[in-house]
Image: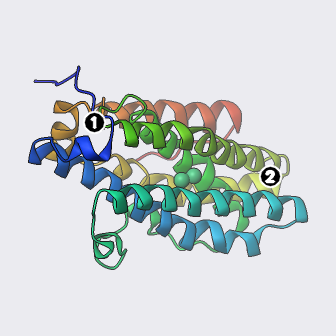
Amino acid sequence: MVVSNLAVRTVAELGQQPEEYRKAVQKLVVSHAVNELYGAQVFDEPAIALAPTPYAKWLTCRVAMEEYHHHLRFKGLADEMGVPAEAMNPDVKKPLTIFHFELKTWPEFCVIKAVADLAEVLQVEDLLHCTFHPLRNLARITMPEEKFHAKFGRDFCTELCQSEGGRAEIQDALNRYFPITPGFFGASHSKNNEMFRKWGIKQRTNDEMRADFQARATDLVENVLGLKLPAL
Ligand SMILES: [Fe+2]
Ligand SMILES: [Fe+2]
C-alpha cells in the first residue's frame, strides 16, 4: 500500500502521524545529519590541503562549507523534531561505508566527488516529492549544491584525464573507490526502504536506485572521461 496523497506540512503535524511514519522520517533525517557531517570531516575538509592550486582550493572550500551546511540543515530539522543529539553522534550512529576510504590524494578526492556525490544526487532526488514537506524542502534546497559537487568532481577528473599520468591516477582511484559505492543504496530487500515507500517518504527501491546509478556512472566514466568502469 502506498499512501500517496499524504502531506505532512510541519513538524507539529508530524507529531500527529502514526509511530511508524515518525520513526521512518527520523531515520532518514538522522542518517543525512550524520553522514553529511562525517563526509565533510573525512573528505571535504582534508581535501582543501590536497587541492593543488588556489582556484582548486577555493572551490574545495566552497564544497566543504556546503557539506557542513547540509549537516546543519538536517541537524536543525532533527533538533526541531526532538531527536536527541546523541542519536546523531557518528560514534553512536555508524556512518555509511562510502566514507570508509582513506583519502590521501587530490585525484582520489576528485573521483569521490564525481562518483559519491552523483550517488548523493540520486538520494536527494528521491526525496524531492517526500510526503514530509520539511524534508522535501531541505532536499529541494540541497539539490543544486549536490549537483555542483558532482560537477566539481567531473570537471577536475576531466582536467586530470588530459595527461597520461592524470588518466592513470583517476583510473586507479576509480578502481579502488567505485566498488564500495553501490552499497550506499542499501540492501536489495530492505525493510526500511519498504517502509519509506509505503509512506511516500521515498519513491524508489534500493535496486532501482542502484541500477540508475550504475547507468549514470557508466556514462560518466566511459563517455565523459573515456576510462573503464571497474567491474563490481
Ligand atoms: Fe551534502
Ligand atoms: Fe555533496
Residue at 65% x, 71% y is 45
The residue at the far front in this view is: 12
Residue for badge 2:
160
Percent position of residue 40, x then y: 56, 66
Measuring from the top left, give residue 162's x and y in whole percent: 84, 46
Dot 1 amino acid type:
Ile
Q: Residue furthest top?
A: 5
**Quarter where residue 27 is shown:** bottom left
User: Which x, y percent locates residue 217?
Assistant: 54, 37
Query: Which residue in the rendered view is the most extreme toward the bottom?
Result: 91
Mark closer to the chain start, 2 or 1: 2
Above or below, 97 relative to 91:
above
Residue at position x 63%, y 45% from top?
145
* Depicted 41 relative to depicted 121: above or below: below
Name the residue type under label 2: Leu
Q: Residue at x 27, y 28 (%)?
A: 7
Mark 2 residue crowding within 10 angstroms, few (<14) / some (14–19) / many (20+):
some
Q: Nearer the viewer, residue 179 or 144?
A: 144
In the rendered structure, find residue 201 and report the number of the disc placed on it.
1
Residue at x 62%, y 35% (from the top left corner): 220
Q: Say which quadrant the N terminus sits in.
A: top left
In the structure shown, which secondary structural element does the residue marked by tag 1 occupy? loop
Vertical relation: 50 (above or below) 174: below
